[in-house]
Image (cartoon, grey):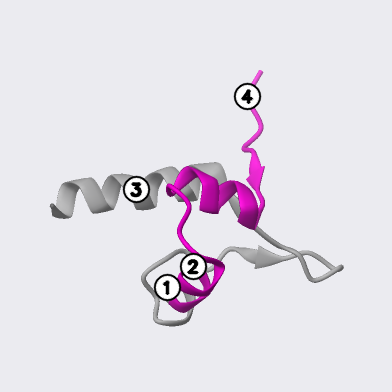
Amino acid sequence: MKKRDELMTVPEILEELGGISVRTFYRWREIGKFPAGFRLPNGDLRLYRSEFEAWLESLREAA
């Protein structure tokens, strides 16, 4: 059976990134330095953990 990809909330993402500010997070999204994610019908933003981890890996490779 295939494991389902976890959906991350903005607070979970900020915590994983070591406590960056909400403003920094949204600025990174606006300028394309972070995956866009998607909005739920209630307006909340979500990002798949696999996309988040792929983004982190791309940062490691670029360093």
How crowded pointer 1 is (Cα within 10 Å; few <14, some 14-19, many 20+) is rated as some
* Residue at (49% x, 67% y) in the render: 25
Contact (CB < 8 A) between labels 1 and 2?
Answer: yes
Q: Is 20 situated above or below 43?
A: above
Residue behind mark 4: 2
Closer to the chain start, of discs 3 and 4, is: 4
Question: In the rendering, at what x and y percent does residue 41 appear?
Answer: 85, 68
SS of the residue at dot 3?
A: helix
Closer to the chain start, of discs 1 and 4, is: 4
SS of the residue at dot 4?
A: loop
The Cα atoms of the two marked residues, 1 and 4, are separated by 31 Å
Contact (CB < 8 A) between labels 2 and 4?
Answer: no
**Stretch of the chain drawn in magenta:** 1-27
Disc number at residue 25? 2
Quadrant where the N terminus is found in the figure: top right
Closer to the chain start, of discs 2 and 4, is: 4
Closer to the chain start, of discs 3 and 1, is: 1
Closer to the chain start, of discs 3 and 2, is: 2
Residue behind mark 1: 28
Residue behind mark 3: 56
Q: Nearer the viewer, mark 2 or mark 4?
A: 2
Amino acid type, label 4 = Lys
The Cα atoms of the two marked residues, 3 and 4, are separated by 23 Å
